[in-house]
Image (tube, rainbow, N blue to C red):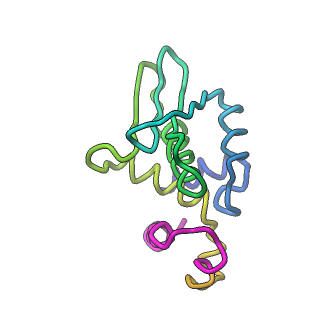
Amino acid sequence: MRSIEEKGRSLRVGWGKRPLTDEDFQRLCKRFRVKVTEMPLNSGGFYYRVKGRDHIAIDSRLSGIAKLKVQFHELAHFLLHAPESGATANFLSVGQKTRVEYEADAFALCALIPRQWLEHRAVEEILGSEDIPQEMLTERLGVFLTYGI
């Protein structure tokens, strides 16, 4: 998990320090030349590489924090798991959860729920003042308690 933290911080956008936004996601995709497409999907989203070009597809029916989590999850596949060459695809919520899926989830959760919130605020306060579902906060707390990020 240490490489997740290093990769997140190397982006220099406040990953893990403040909640990242759709604007942050769009800027990062532009910086890394990742094409983003929104369309109705049977899964939340997926990352794929074809002919040396990187793409992220997002379910157009998603919105708010659920959409942000998928966006940063798929961006994590690009940042952490993209092969040097050849085609690849990673799908959110398809099949058994693998190590790479857990890593992408951890990256996304840290992008959306800053460590400082967990260190300085009660769970009830976060749930009462932020647009964070309890399940997502619970997952984020698990990442923090297990890996310290």
Kindly indicate the quadrant of the structure image that contains residue 128.
Answer: bottom right
In the rendering, at what x and y percent does residue 103 appear? 44, 51
- The question of residue 129 being in magenta is answered with yes
In the rendering, at what x and y percent does residue 2 appear? 51, 56
Residue 103 versus residue 62: which sits nearer the camera?
62
Residue in view at x 60 percent, y 27 percent: 35
Residue in view at x 49 percent, y 14 percent: 51
Residue in view at x 73 percent, y 49 percent: 12
Q: Where the C terminus falls, by quadrant?
A: bottom right
Residue in view at x 43 percent, y 37 percent: 41
Residue 44 versus residue 31: which sits nearer the camera?
44
Q: Is residue 116 above or below residue 124?
A: above
Kindly indicate the quadrant of the structure image that contains residue 29.
Answer: top right
Q: Is residue 128 above or below residue 80?
A: below
Residue 147 versus residue 87: which sits nearer the camera?
87
In the rendering, at what x and y percent does residue 91 appear? 39, 39
Please identify the dominant SS of the magenta region: helix
Start-end of magenta stretch: 126-149
Q: In this view, does 97 lie above or below 33?
A: below
Residue projecting furthest to the top = 51
